[in-house]
């Protein structure tokens, strides 16, 4: 039986590197013995990276006057009301920066992902779905990076196809309504990144580390994409 999950505060402290050496070592031992705990740590690390790339660039930006004006007109309101409005303002500004135009110009990862999703690209193999371990091994060998094909059942998606394109792969899922969600994986093109953008009716999310670039595409809201993307990245076991 797996040990009980560590309290959330200790989990977060481990992810943030805030524990001392002895505690870090003890916690790492628990992770090695608990797949469930390892998944939770991966999820928290993915969420931390998401927040860093979403809100980090806002630190050096000033709030435009056109967004400040409504609050200047209501300075007589209670502090709590003003604080809530300020949070909404910050979130709105983040979205304005986050979903700005021109993000994908010349983006190889996104172009390849959209081409594969629409049926393009030179398919080299369709991987059998029955044996999960074998499926993971085949995809890992193609990418030269150890990965696990995500189980997105908790997000309402069922795996329907695993397609290889030489040293790249596309994982295809559908939900109960038949809507397609795809995860395209290929070798990394550079430094860590996290991007989110709308392409036609679909949201496109790119998550990249030093080894692998992952592009997720689906017809859903940005909020839904962030949720599914976080689950996908954690389950990939990167």
Image (cartoon, grey):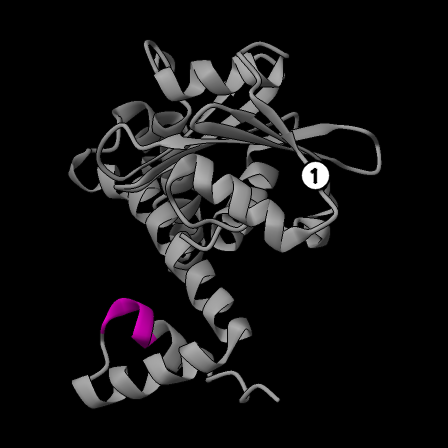
Q: Is residue 97 magenta?
A: no
Q: Give the residue drawn at x 70%, y 54%.
A: 154
Query: Quick check: can you spot residue 188?
Result: yes
Q: Residue furthest right?
A: 177
Q: Place residue 14 in its image quadrant.
A: bottom left
Q: Nearer the viewer, residue 48 or 79?
A: 48
Q: Give the residue drawn at x 46%, y 55%.
A: 237
In this rendering, is residue 34 above or below 113?
below
The prevailing secondary structure element of the residues shown in magenta is: helix
For the N terminus, which image quadrant? Answer: bottom right
Q: Is residue 14 magenta?
A: yes
Is 68 placed left or right of 35 in the picture?
A: left
Q: Give the residue drawn at x 46%, y 84%.
A: 6
Q: Magenta residues, as a range?
A: 13-17
Label 1 packing within 10 angstroms: few (<14), some (14-19), many (20+): some
Q: Place residue 29 in its image quadrant.
A: bottom left
Query: Quick check: can you spot residue 92?
Result: no
Q: Which residue is mark 1?
A: 128
Is 71 placed left or right of 191 in the picture?
A: right
Q: Position of residue 227 (x, y in %)?
A: 56, 46
Q: Nearer the viewer, residue 154 or 94?
A: 154
Q: Position of residue 25 (x, y in %)?
A: 26, 84
The secondary element bearing badge 1 is classed as: loop
Is 195 placed left or right of 211 in the picture?
A: right
Q: Give the residue drawn at x 53%, y 11%.
A: 121
In this rendering, is residue 104 above or below 197?
above
Q: Place residue 106 in its image quadrant.
A: top left
Q: Position of residue 226 (x, y in %)?
A: 52, 41
Q: Report how many numbered discs are placed on residues in the image.
A: 1
Is 188 placed left or right of 165 in the picture?
A: left
Q: Nearer the viewer, residue 147 or 14?
A: 147
């Amino acid at each position: 039986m797996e040990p009980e999950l560590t309290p959330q505060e200790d989990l977060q402290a481990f992810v943030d590197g805030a524990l001392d050496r002895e505690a870090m070592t003890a916690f790492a031992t628990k992770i090695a013995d608990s797949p469930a705990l390892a998944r939770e740590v991966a999820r928290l690390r993915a969420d931390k990276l998401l927040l860093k790339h979403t809100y980090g660039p806002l630190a050096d930006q000033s709030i435009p006057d056109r967004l400040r004006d409504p609050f200047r007109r209501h300075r007589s309101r209670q502090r709590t009301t003003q604080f809530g409005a300020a949070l909404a303002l910050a979130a709105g500004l983040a979205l304005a920066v986050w979903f700005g135009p021109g993000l994908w110009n010349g983006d190889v990862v996104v172009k390849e992902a959209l081409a594969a999703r629409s049926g393009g690209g030179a398919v080299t193999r369709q991987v059998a779905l029955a044996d999960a371990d074998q499926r993971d091994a085949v995809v890992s060998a193609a990418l030269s990076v150890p990965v696990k094909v995500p189980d997105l059942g908790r997000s309402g998606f069922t795996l329907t196809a695993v397609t290889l394109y030489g040293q790249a792969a596309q994982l295809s899922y559908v939900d109960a309504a038949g809507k397609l969600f795809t995860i395209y994986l290929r070798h990394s093109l550079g430094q860590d990144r996290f991007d989110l953008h709308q392409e036609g009716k679909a949201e496109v999310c790119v998550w990249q580390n030093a080894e692998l670039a992952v592009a997720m595409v689906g017809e859903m809201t940005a909020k839904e994409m962030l949720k599914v993307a976080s689950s996908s990245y954690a389950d990939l076991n990167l």
